[in-house]
Image (cartoon, helix red, strand yellow):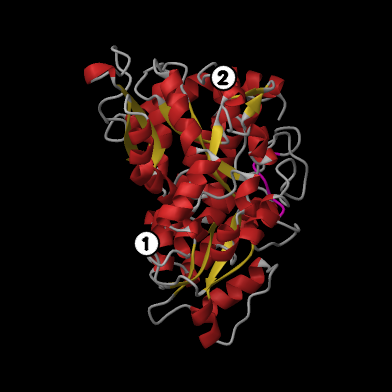
Protein backbone atom coordinates (compact mmCIF):
# COMPACT_ATOMS: atom_id res chain seq x y z
CA UNK A 1 0.00 0.00 0.00
CA UNK A 2 1.55 3.32 -0.99
CA UNK A 3 2.01 6.11 1.51
CA UNK A 4 -0.54 8.42 -0.09
CA UNK A 5 -3.24 5.79 0.42
CA UNK A 6 -2.14 5.25 4.02
CA UNK A 7 -2.19 8.99 4.68
CA UNK A 8 -5.64 9.45 3.17
CA UNK A 9 -7.03 6.41 4.98
CA UNK A 10 -5.51 7.42 8.28
CA UNK A 11 -7.15 10.83 8.12
CA UNK A 12 -10.50 9.32 7.22
CA UNK A 13 -10.40 6.74 9.99
CA UNK A 14 -8.79 8.60 12.84
CA UNK A 15 -12.06 9.43 14.60
CA UNK A 16 -13.23 5.83 14.49
CA UNK A 17 -9.83 4.54 15.62
CA UNK A 18 -9.47 6.96 18.50
CA UNK A 19 -12.98 6.89 19.92
CA UNK A 20 -14.33 3.45 19.14
CA UNK A 21 -11.62 1.61 21.00
CA UNK A 22 -11.77 3.89 24.02
CA UNK A 23 -15.17 2.50 24.91
CA UNK A 24 -13.82 -1.02 24.68
CA UNK A 25 -10.77 -0.32 26.81
CA UNK A 26 -12.13 1.72 29.69
CA UNK A 27 -12.15 -1.22 32.08
CA UNK A 28 -9.23 -3.40 33.04
CA UNK A 29 -6.80 -3.55 30.15
CA UNK A 30 -5.26 -0.11 30.37
CA UNK A 31 -5.39 0.21 34.12
CA UNK A 32 -1.75 -0.57 34.87
CA UNK A 33 0.29 1.80 36.99
CA UNK A 34 3.66 3.47 36.80
CA UNK A 35 5.63 4.49 33.76
CA UNK A 36 5.92 7.77 31.94
CA UNK A 37 3.92 10.15 34.03
CA UNK A 38 4.38 13.85 34.50
CA UNK A 39 7.81 13.29 36.08
CA UNK A 40 9.07 11.49 32.97
CA UNK A 41 8.97 8.13 34.70
CA UNK A 42 11.86 8.90 37.05
CA UNK A 43 11.98 7.13 40.38
CA UNK A 44 14.30 7.23 43.35
CA UNK A 45 17.85 8.28 42.64
CA UNK A 46 16.99 9.35 39.09
CA UNK A 47 16.14 5.81 37.97
CA UNK A 48 13.92 5.71 34.89
CA UNK A 49 10.94 3.37 35.02
CA UNK A 50 9.78 2.29 31.57
CA UNK A 51 6.24 0.97 31.11
CA UNK A 52 5.97 -1.65 28.37
CA UNK A 53 2.57 -2.76 27.11
CA UNK A 54 2.73 -6.22 25.61
CA UNK A 55 0.72 -9.24 24.55
CA UNK A 56 0.86 -12.27 26.85
CA UNK A 57 2.28 -14.61 24.21
CA UNK A 58 5.02 -17.03 25.31
CA UNK A 59 7.87 -15.07 23.71
CA UNK A 60 6.83 -11.93 25.59
CA UNK A 61 6.58 -13.85 28.84
CA UNK A 62 10.15 -15.02 28.22
CA UNK A 63 11.25 -11.42 27.66
CA UNK A 64 9.82 -10.44 31.03
CA UNK A 65 11.56 -13.38 32.66
CA UNK A 66 14.92 -12.28 31.25
CA UNK A 67 14.58 -8.52 31.73
CA UNK A 68 16.68 -8.73 34.90
CA UNK A 69 19.71 -9.28 32.66
CA UNK A 70 19.06 -5.91 31.03
CA UNK A 71 18.37 -4.18 34.33
CA UNK A 72 21.60 -5.48 35.85
CA UNK A 73 23.50 -3.98 32.90
CA UNK A 74 21.46 -0.74 33.10
CA UNK A 75 21.00 -0.05 36.83
CA UNK A 76 19.44 3.32 36.04
CA UNK A 77 16.56 1.74 34.08
CA UNK A 78 13.71 -0.41 35.37
CA UNK A 79 11.18 -2.00 33.01
CA UNK A 80 7.62 -2.59 34.14
CA UNK A 81 5.60 -5.01 31.98
CA UNK A 82 1.85 -4.76 31.52
CA UNK A 83 0.78 -7.99 29.84
CA UNK A 84 -2.65 -8.36 28.27
CA UNK A 85 -4.55 -10.65 25.97
CA UNK A 86 -4.24 -9.70 22.32
CA UNK A 87 -7.61 -7.96 21.96
CA UNK A 88 -7.19 -6.06 25.23
CA UNK A 89 -3.69 -4.94 24.26
CA UNK A 90 -4.90 -3.50 20.96
CA UNK A 91 -7.75 -1.65 22.62
CA UNK A 92 -5.57 -0.22 25.39
CA UNK A 93 -2.60 0.98 23.34
CA UNK A 94 -4.77 2.35 20.52
CA UNK A 95 -6.87 4.36 22.94
CA UNK A 96 -3.78 5.66 24.72
CA UNK A 97 -1.75 6.65 21.67
CA UNK A 98 -4.67 8.15 19.75
CA UNK A 99 -5.38 10.49 22.66
CA UNK A 100 -1.70 11.22 23.45
CA UNK A 101 -2.23 9.60 26.84
CA UNK A 102 1.43 8.94 27.56
CA UNK A 103 0.82 5.88 29.70
CA UNK A 104 3.39 3.71 27.92
CA UNK A 105 7.04 4.14 26.94
CA UNK A 106 7.23 1.03 24.74
CA UNK A 107 4.41 -0.53 22.78
CA UNK A 108 4.10 -4.03 21.40
CA UNK A 109 2.26 -3.47 18.14
CA UNK A 110 1.67 -5.44 14.99
CA UNK A 111 2.71 -4.85 11.41
CA UNK A 112 -0.79 -3.55 10.70
CA UNK A 113 -0.55 -0.57 13.03
CA UNK A 114 2.98 0.65 12.26
CA UNK A 115 2.46 2.41 8.89
CA UNK A 116 -0.87 3.92 9.93
CA UNK A 117 0.36 5.19 13.29
CA UNK A 118 3.62 6.48 11.81
CA UNK A 119 1.69 8.57 9.29
CA UNK A 120 -0.44 9.95 12.11
CA UNK A 121 2.68 11.10 13.96
CA UNK A 122 1.97 8.79 16.89
CA UNK A 123 5.27 6.85 16.79
CA UNK A 124 8.82 8.09 17.29
CA UNK A 125 11.17 7.77 14.31
CA UNK A 126 13.88 5.39 15.54
CA UNK A 127 16.02 5.37 12.39
CA UNK A 128 18.87 7.30 13.96
CA UNK A 129 18.80 5.17 17.11
CA UNK A 130 19.00 1.95 15.11
CA UNK A 131 21.61 3.12 12.62
CA UNK A 132 23.95 4.45 15.30
CA UNK A 133 23.65 1.51 17.72
CA UNK A 134 26.97 -0.30 17.68
CA UNK A 135 26.61 -3.93 16.61
CA UNK A 136 22.83 -3.77 16.20
CA UNK A 137 22.99 -4.64 12.48
CA UNK A 138 19.74 -3.31 11.03
CA UNK A 139 20.45 -5.10 7.75
CA UNK A 140 20.21 -8.43 9.57
CA UNK A 141 16.52 -7.83 10.29
CA UNK A 142 14.53 -9.90 7.79
CA UNK A 143 13.80 -7.73 4.78
CA UNK A 144 10.04 -8.41 4.35
CA UNK A 145 9.48 -7.68 8.03
CA UNK A 146 11.67 -4.56 8.10
CA UNK A 147 9.91 -3.24 5.01
CA UNK A 148 6.54 -3.35 6.80
CA UNK A 149 7.98 -1.21 9.60
CA UNK A 150 9.44 1.46 7.32
CA UNK A 151 7.52 4.52 6.12
CA UNK A 152 9.10 7.09 3.78
CA UNK A 153 12.50 5.45 4.37
CA UNK A 154 12.23 5.88 8.15
CA UNK A 155 12.08 3.03 10.67
CA UNK A 156 9.31 3.27 13.26
CA UNK A 157 9.53 -0.12 15.01
CA UNK A 158 11.81 -3.13 15.33
CA UNK A 159 10.60 -6.74 15.23
CA UNK A 160 10.69 -8.81 18.40
CA UNK A 161 9.50 -11.85 16.53
CA UNK A 162 7.86 -12.49 13.19
CA UNK A 163 5.80 -15.33 11.86
CA UNK A 164 3.77 -16.87 9.14
CA UNK A 165 1.26 -19.66 9.72
CA UNK A 166 1.39 -23.40 9.23
CA UNK A 167 -0.34 -26.61 10.15
CA UNK A 168 0.79 -28.47 13.26
CA UNK A 169 -0.32 -32.02 13.92
CA UNK A 170 0.04 -34.64 16.63
CA UNK A 171 1.97 -37.43 14.94
CA UNK A 172 0.97 -40.08 17.49
CA UNK A 173 -2.75 -39.46 17.00
CA UNK A 174 -2.46 -39.61 13.23
CA UNK A 175 -0.30 -42.74 13.35
CA UNK A 176 -2.96 -44.47 15.43
CA UNK A 177 -5.41 -43.82 12.60
CA UNK A 178 -2.96 -44.67 9.83
CA UNK A 179 -3.07 -41.15 8.40
CA UNK A 180 -0.29 -39.24 6.63
CA UNK A 181 -0.23 -35.46 6.19
CA UNK A 182 1.23 -34.12 2.91
CA UNK A 183 3.86 -31.38 3.04
CA UNK A 184 1.49 -29.16 1.00
CA UNK A 185 -2.02 -30.25 2.08
CA UNK A 186 -5.38 -29.00 0.87
CA UNK A 187 -8.10 -27.93 3.25
CA UNK A 188 -10.33 -30.75 2.01
CA UNK A 189 -7.65 -33.29 2.96
CA UNK A 190 -7.19 -31.83 6.45
CA UNK A 191 -10.93 -31.52 7.07
CA UNK A 192 -11.44 -35.18 6.22
CA UNK A 193 -8.66 -36.28 8.58
CA UNK A 194 -9.79 -33.97 11.39
CA UNK A 195 -13.31 -35.38 11.24
CA UNK A 196 -11.96 -38.94 11.22
CA UNK A 197 -9.86 -38.57 14.39
CA UNK A 198 -12.33 -36.38 16.33
CA UNK A 199 -13.93 -37.96 19.39
CA UNK A 200 -13.03 -40.05 22.45
CA UNK A 201 -11.33 -37.10 24.11
CA UNK A 202 -9.51 -35.92 20.99
CA UNK A 203 -10.35 -32.64 19.28
CA UNK A 204 -9.91 -33.01 15.54
CA UNK A 205 -8.68 -29.46 14.92
CA UNK A 206 -8.36 -26.28 16.95
CA UNK A 207 -9.34 -23.07 15.14
CA UNK A 208 -9.46 -19.64 16.73
CA UNK A 209 -13.08 -18.71 17.41
CA UNK A 210 -12.56 -15.82 19.81
CA UNK A 211 -13.88 -12.59 18.26
CA UNK A 212 -11.33 -10.02 17.19
CA UNK A 213 -9.72 -9.00 13.90
CA UNK A 214 -6.36 -10.23 15.21
CA UNK A 215 -7.78 -13.33 16.85
CA UNK A 216 -10.40 -15.11 14.74
CA UNK A 217 -9.61 -13.33 11.49
CA UNK A 218 -5.87 -13.98 11.57
CA UNK A 219 -6.38 -17.60 10.45
CA UNK A 220 -9.83 -17.11 8.92
CA UNK A 221 -8.79 -14.39 6.45
CA UNK A 222 -6.10 -16.71 5.05
CA UNK A 223 -8.76 -19.39 4.58
CA UNK A 224 -10.98 -16.84 2.83
CA UNK A 225 -8.15 -15.82 0.51
CA UNK A 226 -7.24 -19.33 -0.55
CA UNK A 227 -10.95 -20.02 -1.23
CA UNK A 228 -10.85 -17.11 -3.69
CA UNK A 229 -12.49 -14.50 -1.48
CA UNK A 230 -11.29 -11.28 0.13
CA UNK A 231 -12.53 -8.24 2.02
CA UNK A 232 -12.44 -5.90 -0.99
CA UNK A 233 -11.80 -6.05 -4.70
CA UNK A 234 -9.21 -3.96 -6.53
CA UNK A 235 -11.50 -0.91 -6.52
CA UNK A 236 -12.36 -1.08 -2.80
CA UNK A 237 -15.77 -2.61 -3.43
CA UNK A 238 -16.73 -4.77 -0.44
CA UNK A 239 -16.91 -8.52 -1.19
CA UNK A 240 -17.70 -9.94 2.25
CA UNK A 241 -20.91 -11.59 1.02
CA UNK A 242 -19.21 -12.88 -2.14
CA UNK A 243 -18.90 -16.51 -3.12
CA UNK A 244 -15.32 -17.12 -1.95
CA UNK A 245 -15.80 -15.40 1.40
CA UNK A 246 -19.06 -17.25 2.02
CA UNK A 247 -17.66 -20.67 1.09
CA UNK A 248 -14.64 -20.15 3.34
CA UNK A 249 -16.64 -19.09 6.39
CA UNK A 250 -19.08 -21.95 5.85
CA UNK A 251 -16.14 -24.37 5.63
CA UNK A 252 -14.49 -22.93 8.76
CA UNK A 253 -17.61 -22.93 10.91
CA UNK A 254 -18.74 -26.35 9.71
CA UNK A 255 -15.34 -27.86 10.51
CA UNK A 256 -15.36 -26.32 13.98
CA UNK A 257 -18.85 -27.71 14.54
CA UNK A 258 -17.91 -31.19 13.33
CA UNK A 259 -14.36 -31.59 14.60
CA UNK A 260 -13.39 -28.54 16.64
CA UNK A 261 -13.06 -27.71 20.29
CA UNK A 262 -16.05 -27.26 22.56
CA UNK A 263 -17.04 -23.66 23.27
CA UNK A 264 -15.08 -22.40 20.24
CA UNK A 265 -15.88 -18.72 20.85
CA UNK A 266 -13.68 -18.76 23.96
CA UNK A 267 -10.64 -20.07 22.04
CA UNK A 268 -7.92 -17.76 20.77
CA UNK A 269 -4.22 -18.40 20.25
CA UNK A 270 -3.43 -19.09 23.90
CA UNK A 271 -6.33 -21.49 24.44
CA UNK A 272 -5.52 -23.49 21.28
CA UNK A 273 -1.86 -23.59 22.31
CA UNK A 274 -2.82 -25.07 25.67
CA UNK A 275 -5.16 -27.63 24.10
CA UNK A 276 -2.59 -28.75 21.56
CA UNK A 277 0.40 -28.90 23.90
CA UNK A 278 -1.63 -31.00 26.35
CA UNK A 279 -2.02 -33.60 23.60
CA UNK A 280 -5.76 -33.12 23.24
CA UNK A 281 -5.92 -31.90 19.62
CA UNK A 282 -4.84 -33.66 16.45
CA UNK A 283 -4.45 -30.55 14.29
CA UNK A 284 -3.83 -26.88 14.94
CA UNK A 285 -3.57 -24.25 12.23
CA UNK A 286 -1.89 -21.14 13.60
CA UNK A 287 1.27 -19.06 13.89
CA UNK A 288 4.68 -20.53 13.12
CA UNK A 289 5.93 -18.82 16.28
CA UNK A 290 3.91 -21.30 18.33
CA UNK A 291 6.36 -24.06 17.47
CA UNK A 292 8.89 -22.87 20.02
CA UNK A 293 6.43 -23.54 22.83
CA UNK A 294 5.13 -26.72 21.21
CA UNK A 295 8.66 -28.16 21.10
CA UNK A 296 9.71 -27.05 24.58
CA UNK A 297 9.75 -30.02 27.00
CA UNK A 298 9.16 -27.59 29.84
CA UNK A 299 5.97 -26.25 28.26
CA UNK A 300 4.56 -29.06 26.15
CA UNK A 301 3.49 -32.67 26.57
CA UNK A 302 3.86 -33.24 22.81
CA UNK A 303 7.41 -31.95 22.32
CA UNK A 304 9.16 -34.14 19.76
CA UNK A 305 5.86 -35.70 18.66
CA UNK A 306 4.62 -32.98 16.30
CA UNK A 307 4.67 -32.74 12.52
CA UNK A 308 4.51 -29.53 10.50
CA UNK A 309 3.17 -28.70 7.03
CA UNK A 310 2.50 -25.67 4.87
CA UNK A 311 -0.77 -23.84 5.48
CA UNK A 312 -3.51 -25.81 3.69
CA UNK A 313 -4.76 -24.37 0.40
CA UNK A 314 -7.69 -24.47 -2.01
CA UNK A 315 -7.02 -22.24 -5.02
CA UNK A 316 -3.67 -20.65 -4.15
CA UNK A 317 -0.18 -22.16 -3.93
CA UNK A 318 0.43 -20.77 -0.43
CA UNK A 319 -1.94 -19.47 2.22
CA UNK A 320 0.21 -18.57 5.22
CA UNK A 321 0.09 -15.13 6.73
CA UNK A 322 2.95 -12.67 7.43
CA UNK A 323 3.04 -10.88 10.75
CA UNK A 324 5.44 -9.41 13.25
CA UNK A 325 5.05 -8.34 16.84
CA UNK A 326 7.21 -5.24 17.12
CA UNK A 327 8.48 -2.83 19.72
CA UNK A 328 7.88 0.88 19.13
CA UNK A 329 8.15 4.11 21.09
CA UNK A 330 5.08 6.35 21.26
CA UNK A 331 5.84 9.97 20.44
CA UNK A 332 4.29 10.88 23.79
CA UNK A 333 6.99 9.05 25.81
CA UNK A 334 9.36 11.25 27.80
CA UNK A 335 11.90 8.41 28.02
CA UNK A 336 12.75 7.74 24.38
CA UNK A 337 16.49 7.13 24.83
CA UNK A 338 15.96 4.71 27.72
CA UNK A 339 13.16 3.03 25.78
CA UNK A 340 15.47 2.50 22.82
CA UNK A 341 18.14 1.01 25.09
CA UNK A 342 15.69 -1.71 26.13
CA UNK A 343 14.32 -2.22 22.61
CA UNK A 344 17.85 -2.54 21.26
CA UNK A 345 18.65 -5.20 23.86
CA UNK A 346 15.40 -7.14 23.36
CA UNK A 347 15.73 -7.33 19.56
CA UNK A 348 19.48 -7.91 19.35
CA UNK A 349 21.51 -10.94 18.29
CA UNK A 350 22.74 -11.10 21.86
CA UNK A 351 19.20 -11.45 23.21
CA UNK A 352 18.53 -14.34 20.86
CA UNK A 353 21.69 -16.01 22.15
CA UNK A 354 20.57 -15.36 25.74
CA UNK A 355 17.18 -17.00 25.20
CA UNK A 356 18.80 -20.03 23.62
CA UNK A 357 21.31 -20.48 26.42
CA UNK A 358 18.97 -19.72 29.33
CA UNK A 359 15.58 -21.03 28.21
CA UNK A 360 16.27 -23.39 25.32
CA UNK A 361 16.89 -22.88 21.62
CA UNK A 362 13.37 -23.86 20.58
CA UNK A 363 12.12 -20.78 22.48
CA UNK A 364 14.22 -18.28 20.53
CA UNK A 365 12.07 -15.50 18.99
CA UNK A 366 11.75 -16.55 15.34
CA UNK A 367 11.50 -14.67 12.09
CA UNK A 368 13.13 -11.40 13.12
CA UNK A 369 16.77 -11.89 12.08
CA UNK A 370 18.44 -13.72 9.21
CA UNK A 371 21.34 -14.73 11.47
CA UNK A 372 19.04 -16.71 13.78
CA UNK A 373 18.73 -19.39 11.10
CA UNK A 374 22.51 -19.74 10.91
CA UNK A 375 22.98 -20.61 14.60
CA UNK A 376 23.96 -24.32 14.82
CA UNK A 377 22.28 -24.84 18.20
CA UNK A 378 19.03 -23.35 16.90
CA UNK A 379 19.10 -25.49 13.79
CA UNK A 380 19.71 -28.58 15.89
CA UNK A 381 16.93 -28.01 18.43
CA UNK A 382 14.42 -26.24 16.18
CA UNK A 383 15.11 -28.36 13.12
CA UNK A 384 11.56 -29.70 13.02
CA UNK A 385 10.18 -26.28 12.14
CA UNK A 386 12.97 -23.71 11.60
CA UNK A 387 13.64 -24.28 7.90
CA UNK A 388 9.92 -24.67 7.12
CA UNK A 389 9.18 -21.39 8.90
CA UNK A 390 11.84 -19.59 6.89
CA UNK A 391 10.60 -21.16 3.67
CA UNK A 392 7.00 -20.14 4.29
CA UNK A 393 7.86 -16.61 5.36
CA UNK A 394 9.83 -16.04 2.18
CA UNK A 395 7.20 -17.71 -0.05
CA UNK A 396 4.01 -15.88 0.89
CA UNK A 397 3.00 -12.82 -1.12
CA UNK A 398 1.61 -9.91 0.93
CA UNK A 399 0.92 -7.90 -2.25
CA UNK A 400 -1.50 -10.53 -3.58
CA UNK A 401 -2.09 -13.36 -1.11
CA UNK A 402 -5.38 -14.41 -2.67
CA UNK A 403 -6.63 -15.26 -6.14
CA UNK A 404 -7.33 -11.68 -7.23
CA UNK A 405 -5.31 -8.44 -6.94
CA UNK A 406 -5.92 -6.20 -3.94
CA UNK A 407 -5.27 -2.47 -3.41
CA UNK A 408 -3.33 -2.90 -0.14
CA UNK A 409 -0.27 -4.78 1.08
CA UNK A 410 -1.04 -7.33 3.77
CA UNK A 411 -2.30 -10.87 4.10
CA UNK A 412 -4.48 -11.43 7.15
CA UNK A 413 -5.42 -7.79 7.52
CA UNK A 414 -6.35 -4.75 5.43
CA UNK A 415 -4.02 -1.80 5.95
CA UNK A 416 -6.65 0.86 6.62
CA UNK A 417 -7.61 2.27 10.03
CA UNK A 418 -11.21 1.17 9.58
CA UNK A 419 -10.23 -2.50 9.45
CA UNK A 420 -9.70 -2.77 13.19
CA UNK A 421 -13.34 -1.99 13.87
CA UNK A 422 -14.58 -3.77 10.75
CA UNK A 423 -12.78 -7.01 11.56
CA UNK A 424 -13.90 -6.90 15.18
CA UNK A 425 -17.55 -6.41 14.28
CA UNK A 426 -17.64 -9.06 11.55
CA UNK A 427 -15.90 -11.52 13.87
CA UNK A 428 -18.67 -10.94 16.39
CA UNK A 429 -21.20 -11.85 13.72
CA UNK A 430 -19.32 -15.07 12.91
CA UNK A 431 -19.03 -15.88 16.61
CA UNK A 432 -22.84 -15.99 16.58
CA UNK A 433 -22.59 -18.62 13.83
CA UNK A 434 -20.15 -20.66 15.90
CA UNK A 435 -22.54 -20.42 18.85
CA UNK A 436 -25.39 -21.71 16.67
CA UNK A 437 -27.42 -18.53 16.86
CA UNK A 438 -27.04 -17.23 13.30
CA UNK A 439 -26.50 -18.45 9.75
CA UNK A 440 -23.38 -17.71 7.72
CA UNK A 441 -25.48 -15.83 5.16
CA UNK A 442 -26.98 -13.52 7.79
CA UNK A 443 -23.59 -12.92 9.42
CA UNK A 444 -21.94 -11.96 6.15
CA UNK A 445 -24.88 -9.84 5.03
CA UNK A 446 -24.31 -7.74 8.13
CA UNK A 447 -20.57 -7.78 7.47
CA UNK A 448 -21.07 -6.62 3.90
CA UNK A 449 -22.81 -3.44 5.03
CA UNK A 450 -19.97 -2.65 7.41
CA UNK A 451 -17.36 -3.35 4.74
CA UNK A 452 -19.16 -1.13 2.23
CA UNK A 453 -18.82 1.81 4.61
CA UNK A 454 -15.10 1.10 5.12
CA UNK A 455 -14.49 0.65 1.42
CA UNK A 456 -16.28 3.88 0.53
CA UNK A 457 -13.86 5.79 2.74
CA UNK A 458 -10.95 4.66 0.53
CA UNK A 459 -12.41 5.91 -2.75
Q: Residue at x 41, y 22 (%)?
A: 338
Nearer to the camera, 340 or 400: 340
Q: Residue furthest left?
A: 44
Query: Left or right: 393 with respect to 442?
Result: right
| Region in magenta | 228-232
Within the magenta stretch, is there residue 229? yes
Residue 139 picture quarter: top right
Within the magenta stretch, is there residue 41? no
Query: Left or right: 360 with respect to 287?
Result: left
How many residues crowd around disc 1 within 10 Å: few (fewer than 14), some, or many (20 or more)?
few
Q: Position of residue 182 (x, y in %)?
A: 68, 73
How many residues crowd around disc 2 within 10 Å: few (fewer than 14), some, or many (20 or more)?
many
Query: Left or right: 270 with respect to 78?
Result: right
Residue 114 picture quarter: top right
Q: Which residue is mark 1?
A: 263
* Earlier-in-chain disc, 1 versus 2: 2
Question: Callout 2: helix, strand or loop?
Answer: loop
Position of the N terminus by quadrant: top right
Q: Which residue is mark 2?
A: 125
Residue 87 position (above or below residue 93): below
Nearer to the camera, 161 or 227: 161
Q: Overall secondary structure of the magenta stretch?
A: loop
Residue 319 can be seen in this image:
no
Q: Position of residue 287 (x, y in %)?
A: 54, 54
Nearer to the camera, 455 or 183: 183
Query: Left or right: 102 with respect to 295?
Result: left
Q: Position of residue 143 (x, y in %)?
A: 69, 39
Amino acid sequence: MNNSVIRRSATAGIGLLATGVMLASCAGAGAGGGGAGGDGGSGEGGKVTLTLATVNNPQMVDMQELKGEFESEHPDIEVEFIQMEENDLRDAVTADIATNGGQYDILTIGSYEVPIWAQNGWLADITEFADSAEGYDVDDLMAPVRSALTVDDSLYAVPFYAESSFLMYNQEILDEHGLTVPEHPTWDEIAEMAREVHGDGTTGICFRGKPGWGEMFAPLTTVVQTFGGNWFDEDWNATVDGEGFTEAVQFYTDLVSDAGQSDPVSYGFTECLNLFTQGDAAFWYDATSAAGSVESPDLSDVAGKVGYAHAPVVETEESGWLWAWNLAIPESSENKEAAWEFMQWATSKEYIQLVGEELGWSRVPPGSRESTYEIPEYQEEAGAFADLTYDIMTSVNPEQPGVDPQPWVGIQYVTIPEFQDLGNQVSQEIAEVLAGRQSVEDALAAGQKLAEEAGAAQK
